[in-house]
Amino acid sequence: MKKFLIYLIIPATLFLSCNKTEYDAMDWSKIMGDSLETTYTIAQLKAEFMTDYDAYSDTTQKGGLYTADLIQSEQDVVISGRVTSTDVEGNVYKYFVIQEEGKDGQAIKVSIDASGLSAIYPLGQKVWIRCNGLYIGKYGGAAQIGSRYVNKKRFKLVGVNKDTVYRVEPGRMPMFMAEQAIHAYGLPDPKVIEPETMTIGEIFKTDTAALTNKLVKIKNAYFTGFKGDNNVIAMEDMIFAPSTGGVGYPQTRMITDGTGTIAIATSEYARFANKPIPTSNYRGDITVLVGWYKNYTDKNGDWQLTLRTLGDLGTGFEGYLESVNYSNL
């Protein structure tokens, strides 16, 4: 029996010694999901499927602010981009943002009724979204992809018969629908996510549809100590987001770079909500997701910026981050 085993081992050893023992690195992108053909840009998707009127808010024929339109087509409606958001610090919640590659690429928010989305769609992940059967709409004038939601807390009575008109807006799609529609491909690469450098003055001059949801870096910026209504922040509230008593609206803190002043909005549920805002002696790079919100058609809207993490306070804020014991590890 022992001789028989030896006879087996020797040929096997000879066979292995004659074969290649070092292999070329495997292309991981070939086994990490299926790539789809992109058939629409985000701009084309909005232009073809998103309406500009809603019965709830459009009382002056200046364009609707809350809409939700079904994406229907006999052809595949596929957009693609890189994930530029992260929810690891709680200031991004139940959505992620994809941005098309290239300077002229647009970005859009994708709303999903699930938390911890960065575990599935991490920063730098390439994704394709087959939009057929999903909804695209406006929330406060800003485009989102999701489901159709009838907000029965927001309504008005119209006409002689006082018919009830509810606000229809984009809602969060269920997770099972997201899993069918969203296709990740390759490994996430956060290093390819490069924000576009802009001044605050340039943000104000840019078309809202083209800029909303994009990742932008503002240089030489600092916190002014004012909040959104241009009132000085009380000493006891010199943090990013004091409690709202459960109401949940974002708290605004103003920043400037010398070309304009703009609001950074933070959720009271963000992990850094109770961190003190940097004093004005800290000046440097601030990276943000650019948001837009307009609640009334006959009034001006507002830009609202979102920090994904406290680490979006970059060069120039090192001393501040050290003082609050911040680590993104």
Image: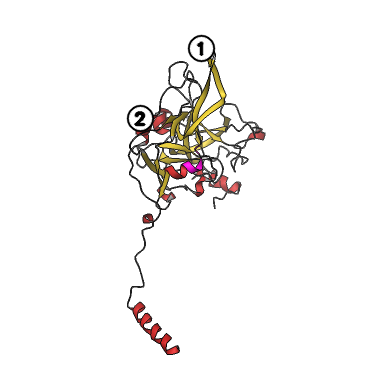
Task: Please name the residue shown 33% across and 35% down the image.
Answer: 74
Q: Is residue 74 left or right of residue 215?
A: left
Q: Residue furthest bottom?
A: 3
Q: Is residue 51 visible?
A: yes
Residue 252's quadrant in the figure?
top right
Give how far across and how far down residue 108 sits, in percent.
43, 36
The Cα atoms of the two marked residues, 2 and 1, are separated by: 30 Å
Q: Which residue is mark 1?
A: 159
Task: Please name the residue shown 42% across and 50% down the image.
Answer: 191
Q: Which residue is mark 2?
A: 48
Q: Which residues are magenta?
A: 172-177
In the image, what residue type sits under mark 2? Glu
In the image, what residue type sits under mark 1? Gly
Asked if marks 2 and 1 touch (Cβ < 8 Å), the reply is: no
Looking at the rendered image, the disc whose residue lies closer to the viewer, 2 or 1, is: 1
Tell me if residue 321 is in the magenta stretch: no
